[in-house]
Amino acid sequence: LDNGTVAHFEGYRVQHNTSRGPGKGGVRFHQDVTLSEVMALSAWMSIKNAAVNVPYGGAKGGIRVDPKTLSMGELERMTRRYTSEIGIIIGPTKDIPAPDVNTNEQVMAWMMDTYSMNEGATATGVVTGKPIDLGGSLGRREATGRGVFTVGCEAANHIGLDVAKARVAVQGFGNVGGIAGKLFAEAGARIVAVQDHGGTIYHEAGLDVPALLTHVSRHGSVKGFAGAEVVSDDSFWDVECDILIPAALEGQITAANAGRIKARMVIEGANGPTTPAADDILRDRNILVLPDVIANAGGVTVSYFEWVQDFSSFFWSEDEINARLVRIMKEAFAGVWQIAQDHKVSLRTATFIIACKRILHARELRGLYP
């Protein structure tokens, strides 16, 4: 540490399944990281990658640390040590980390540099979510939110919901919720409520989304935004809306509030925002849930694009990236929707059916060795 003392941080990298390709999944820095959590998240990534049919297995990593307690220098040294320790099991064709909770493109730059220095050659493809100048991809920051919007529009078409007339409530207004909200607003929808760690705001006629994005960028939350009514956080679940997008933390929709939700459709922008009990309640109330493993897979899809661009050293325009992302998300959703109709199951179950079949088929084709 900066004061000359030595601190001990416990870190993990878990590879769940690599039958379909190298491991892929984020690295999170959080004080509550545990091995069991990272193991579960790596399995989630196997499902998500197979669901959108990108050629990856599932992996995840994390360090049990509160990064807010570290200086920039301490954060860098911890990141580099972690990368050196897991260096033997990661690599552009082995396992490719990416940003997650409390990690960003600067952390990815340090990881890429550390791995490259240890290997004796620059390996930009060892991580994704990098700065553009170090082999990052255009459109990566907006990718998850764009994927949420894309599958939301596809689902709306199936249930006869006109997006141009829809009322949308968003929880979390960062890279996922903010981008999704912006795209829905541009499509004609009214963003009637937004909640984040700064509070909950409501405007029945629709919030000024560009102004709100600017406000959040400057002040860090929706708190203090002038163009809306401030309401209690709990009342967010009572908002009259057609589409609800939980894009913040896990476990937000519970058995306690699922019965109050007015939306026709829930799009899971966050990972695990709906508890199993709440999922059952929403299904019984005929509220369509677009599960996280398909709805927020836009991020890993454009991470795949970044990896491909790094290997070829040829980079695409943002329009090309967005067009490819939309095509993959639409194809993935169409497959999930068809399975759900054929087997009369939820979209979540249908996504797991498709993903598990793809993983199993790859394993069967490869066989067992040694």
Image (cartoon, rainbow, N blue to C red):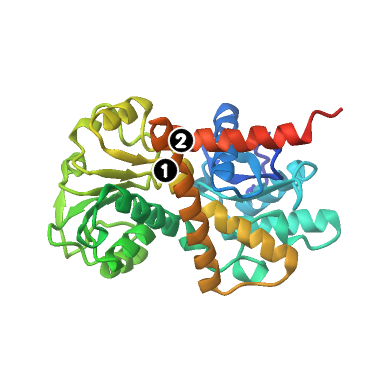
Distance of label 1 from label 2 (alpha carbons):
7 Å
Q: Residue at (25%, 51%) from the top-left corner? A: 160
Q: Is residue 97 above or below residue 276?
A: below
Q: Residue at (30%, 52%) from the top-left corner? A: 156
Q: Crowding near pointer 1: few (<14 within 10 Å), some, many (20+)?
A: many
* Residue at image mark 2: 350
Q: Is residue 19 above or below residue 160?
A: above
**Spot occupied by residue 171 in the image (x, y as percentages of width and height):** 30, 48
Q: Residue at (40%, 52%) from the top-left corner? A: 151
Lower position in the chain sequence, tag 1 or tag 2: 1
**Spot occupied by residue 169 in the image (x, y as percentages of width and height):** 24, 51
Along the line of sight, which residue is nearer the eye, 53 or 248?
53
The mark tally for this picture is 2
Which quadrant of the figure contains the C terminus?
top right
- Horizontal placement of 43 versus 314: left or right? left
Check if mark 1's residue and mark 2's residue have beta carbons within 8 Å.
Answer: yes
Q: Secondary structure at mark 1?
A: helix
Q: Secondary structure at mark 2?
A: helix
Q: Residue at (74%, 67%) from the top-left corner? A: 312
- Horizontal placement of 98 versus 217: left or right? right
- Horizontal placement of 346 versus 140: left or right? left
**Spot occupied by residue 112 in the image (x, y as percentages of width and height):** 71, 57
Number of the label disc, if any, that sits on residue 337? 1
> Is residue 138 at least partly visible in the picture?
yes
What amino acid does circle 2 point to?
A: Ala
> Is residue 11 at least partly visible in the picture?
no
What amino acid does circle 1 point to?
A: Trp
Number of the label disc, if any, that sits on residue 208? none
Q: Crowding near pointer 2: few (<14 within 10 Å), some, many (20+)?
A: many
**Spot occupied by residue 344 in the image (x, y as percentages of width and height):** 38, 31
